[in-house]
Image (cartoon, rainbow, N blue to C red):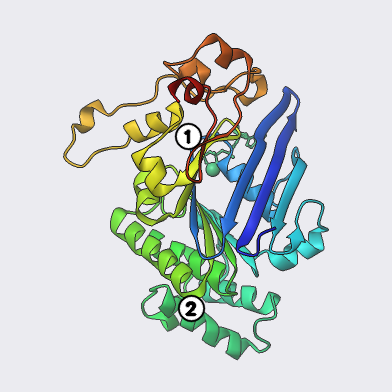
Amino acid sequence: MSKENVLEIRDLHSSFFTDSGVVRAVNGVDLVIPQGKIIGLVGESGCGKSMTAKSVMGLLRYPGRIESGSIRFMDKELVGLPDKELRKLCGNEMSMIFQEPMTSLNPVLRVGRQVEEAILVHGKAEKRAEAKKLVLDMFEHVGIPEGEKRYSCYPHELSGGLRQRVMIAMAMVCRPRLLIADEPTTALDVTIEAQILQLMQKECRESGMSILLITHNLGVVAEICDFVYVMYAGRIVESGSVCEIFDHPAHPYTRGLLHSMPVIGGDQEYLYAIPGAVPNLLRLGAGCAFCGRCEKAQDRCREEMPELKAVGEDHFSRCFLHETEG
Ligand SMILES: Nc1ncnc2c1ncn2[C@@H]1O[C@H](COP(=O)(O)OP(=O)(O)OP(=O)(O)O)[C@@H](O)[C@H]1O
Ligand SMILES: [Mg+2]
């Protein structure tokens, strides 16, 4: 494992074993997160983004589990790590922010206390007073005004933006090396979204924290990510630097995603959408999972799975087209 990488996921397979069959939600994913970088993970709903994140955090629950592969965090292999050791890492050296803060905050505990607990559980402070000071410092850091007053609020007494800031404070208070943010701003309005993204960016620059940012929003990716992974039906179909992906998208799926981005001043009534829908992960064929929606699909695409191939500097795509397009 390279010293500069905080996380390395290799050939990860995570599935749900349901009565109707095996749902291959993560189907051979490779993904690397270097130190101090913001890495985007994008793709339509149901393509396996959250399952990838939950696999890293050890949050997969029955009937889902990691089948095979490797997840290295710093110098530790997480696949097969006993729960107790994983719990020590989670919330401490790595933490996660979820889409809907209301479901992740305890509704009957004051928010300040919840953040304080994270500090005490991970031994970052011994006394409550000391922990409270850290909480108030963190509140100020993430832009929660009147910290002392907010400290005593219950989650429902705060606006959506403030609740998400509390979640971010909780996720960052132990100074993690890796933050996984799963759609952290989807529930927020655009000005608050911009503030939260700026805050995460600042944290990366100042403390060397790395972020895996999961989002549907390619505009957000363009703004703050260094590198992007595009996921489709459980697989990475394209990866590259933000410049490469936005200036020279290679995979027809990525091109479709970019094409369906709203343009400022554009005609929003006729927004393009990729035709068709994500295939049923229970019934994936042998070929490329995108072939049913791809206007350039050939017979071969239905029969064989293309490999991820280099199409530029540090830019990879999983498509047979590149062999003919050159
Ligand atoms: N408990 C479950 N049992 C069976 N299948 C599941 C279960 N939870 C999730 N899945 C399936 O796993 C696949 C991946 O889901 P995942 O939540 O990772 O998607 P996602 O990319 O995060 O989507 P979204 O953008 O909507 O959050 C989906 O097809 C989903 O149907
Ligand atoms: Mg998700």
Q: Which mark is residue 86?
A: none
Q: Which residue is pictured at 45% across the width and 77% down the height?
A: 139
Residue 102, x across and y down, in percent: 50, 56
- The amino acid type of the residue labelled 2 equals Met
Query: Which label's residue is closer to the chain start, 1 or 2?
Result: 1
- The amino acid type of the residue labelled 1 equals Glu
Label 2, residues with CA under 10 Å away: few <14, some 14-19, many ≥20: many
218 versus 163 height, above or below: above
Residue 110, x across and y down, in percent: 53, 72
User: Which residue in the rendered view is the most extreme toward the left?
Assistant: 265
105 versus 59 height, above or below: below
Front residue (pair 155, 51) = 51
For disc 2, the marked residue is 138
Asked whether mark 1 lies closer than 8 Å to ligand 1, one says: yes
Q: Is mark 1 on a helix, strand or loop?
A: loop
User: What count of labels does the image hold?
Assistant: 2
For disc 1, the marked residue is 44
Residue 47, x across and y down, in percent: 55, 34
Residue 217 visible in the shown view = no
Q: Quadrant of the N terminus?
A: bottom right
Front residue (pair 72, 57) = 72
Compared across the picture, whether 232 is left or right of 146 comes to right
